[in-house]
Image (cartoon, rainbow, N blue to C red):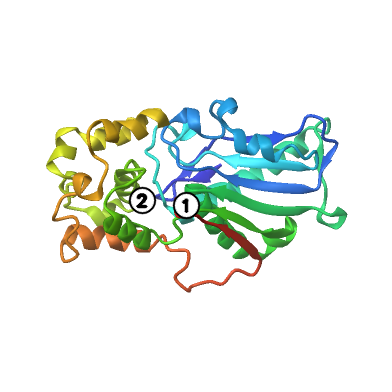
Amino acid sequence: PSVDAQGNPIILSGCIYYNKRAESFSEILLYTHQTAFSNNDVPSGNAATNLEPNVLTVSRSTIVFASDYVGFNASGDKMHPYMNQELAARNEIDMLKAGMVFMMQDKDRPQIKSVKDGLKTYVVGYSQGGAVALATHRAIEADAELCSDINFCGSYCGAGPYDLETTFEMFKTQDEMSLPAVLPYVLVGMYESYPESFSGINLNDYLSDEAVKNDMLSFVKSKSATGNALSWYTDRGLTSVTSIMSKEALDENSTLWKTLTKCMRKQSLIDGSWTPKHNTVLYHSTG
């Protein structure tokens, strides 16, 4: 049980990973998955593709809880509110709580040790998951009781857009994008998160004539397989900010730009409003 972007009750899906030879668990890893476009590519999808959480359970003492984000599998009737950090963090914590209850319900399952017996909890994620990991870190620390109950020890965050506005500015400077699919995904994600902010705005006004001609928004909402979602843009020559976005949308004096920026600004995890109390390890590369 969790909530969607508007705070409505919702049922999410997820996956629990652990080594079959485990006798008990002294370490919980809350795994925040990277950008996905289809139901098959989230934790409760095709387990064969979920290499990272499987690798994390090589240790018999580690159990991994991994929530699907809103918009996939159990909540697949909704569009994923991409890069809504506060929501994704809430979803992850609800997965953690539900997963711990699930494991306790059957005494034949390996049990999770108590804090006094040495339990430690971490959050780990890469790409979108890197940002969600830091957001989840923040949310756990905001709940002192939860922080204590799970003995939260920190996060490992890989290559996340911790400040979405700055990331977008970088895209504009570089123009050519290695992953052009994320640009319209951010636009749709902000609309799904804050529809009232876009009142009176046609989302197609953010897109170039070529992007509109190819019905880019419908493709984003189709939840195509991730491989298709990555190649679709390249096949149509839509690989740069200026080939995807309209001139008006990139005009910093326009209503379009100000609206999108206002929503992206709400996602900042490094705006000075909090300071982590537990260690966080940040992994980055220019790639």
Contact, mark 2 vs mark 1 (Cβ under 8 Å): yes
Q: Amino acid at mark 1?
A: Leu
Using a 10 Å C-alpha cutoff, classify the residue at mark 2 as few (fewer than 14 neighbours), some (14 to 19) or many (20 or more).
Answer: many
Q: Is residue 110 above or below residue 161?
A: above
Q: Secondary structure at mark 2?
A: helix
Question: In terms of sequence position, does the residue under pointer 2 or pointer 1 come before the other?
Answer: 1
219 sits to left or right of 44: left
Q: Which mark is residue 193?
A: 2
Q: Secondary structure at mark 1?
A: helix
List x then y, in percent, for residue 206.
19, 49
In front of the other: 17 or 11: 17
Q: Is residue 35 above or below residue 147?
A: above
Q: Amino acid at mark 2?
A: Ser
23 sits to left or right of 28: right
Q: Quadrant of the N terminus?
A: top right
Query: Which residue is labeled 1 in the image?
Result: 87
- What residue do we see at 73% from left, 55% from top? 150
